[in-house]
Amino acid sequence: MTRKDFLFLPIVVFMFFTALVTVAEASMVTPIRILLVPGHDNEVWGSQYGNTKEADMTLELATKIYDILKQDERFEVYITRDTAGYTKEFADYFSSEREAILNFKTTARKAEKEKIAAGNFIEKETVAHNTVSKDIAVILYGINKWANENKMDAVIHIHFNDYPRSSRWAIGKYKGFAIYLPDGQLPNWKESGQLAANIFIELSKKYLASNYKKELGGLIPDQKLIALGSSSTLLPGVRSVLIEYGYIYDKKFRTKSARENSYENMSQMTVDGIQNYFFDK
Ligand SMILES: [Zn+2]
């Protein structure tokens, strides 16, 4: 070793440690945790046009969103079900935590009733939603409880819209997408609203917002949807949005190839909105 080599050694050592610190810092940045919830399931599949079931559509679109987000290291992505049904994680959670989930629901609703009685929460009339069975309540409240416990940063509920029509094959009169967000009295409303707005901006680049009177404008606050954290069942840090990507009978979902094409666009736009919200605010 020459004298010159000795001079270089500390520099090399210094560079080595700097590199180590950079790697350590990078891994210390916790990824953004996103839970995707393809609406409904194989037992209760939501709406239907002809032979096309909403639950199959939501799964296909959610899976595409999952695949795109999964490639982005800044995110850690979860999904509640796949083609085989609820994933093991969720199926196990719903069955082993059933009683705890029902208690979670009862406690939250009781607390809300007390707030209403004390004048600290104002009930509003919103878009009518279907009432849910006990089993579906376990699933929906269970997802909220799981999202709180697992510190999700956002829950994205994926749906296709419908309203009562004369027959399964009837083409309805409403069109367009709508994004539901938590009402301003719910703990997670503010950040959820920002996330919803970012996704709205992207979807608006190609699609029109709903022309249904109660969905006009396309961004709809709601205090009754369990998915959004009704009865304050989602913590302030757990953003939640429910996207109705369009009416199920719409032309863009009518054939398999049209659907494929729509999912392609809608998944990318949803991911763009999520990325913009979390990283380019
Ligand atoms: Zn639905």
Image (spheres, rainbow, N blue to C red):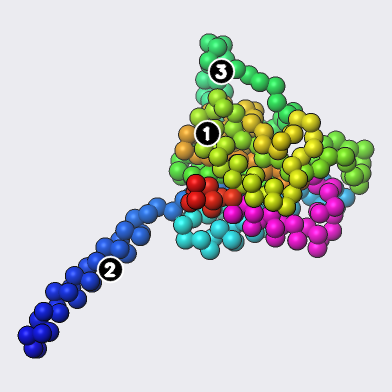
- State the residue in front, 3 or 269: 3
For the residues marked 3 and 2, what is the alpha-carbon distance in whole angstroms? Answer: 53 Å
The answer to whether residue 46 is seen in the rendering is: no
The residue shown at (84%, 58%) is 255
Pointer 1 residue? 190
Is the stretch drawn in magenta largely helix, strand or loop? helix
Residue linked to disc 3: 121
Residue 264 drawn at (x, y percent): 70, 60
Q: Secondary structure at mark 2?
A: helix
Amino acid found under the numbered disc labelled 1:
Lys
Q: Is residue 11 above or below residue 176?
A: below
For badge 3, the amino acid type reads Phe
3 or 2: tag closer to the N-terminus: 2
- Is 90 on the left or on the right of 128, as rendered? left
Residues shaded magenta: 247-272
* Relative to 10, 177 lies left or right: right
* Location of mark 2 (residue): 19
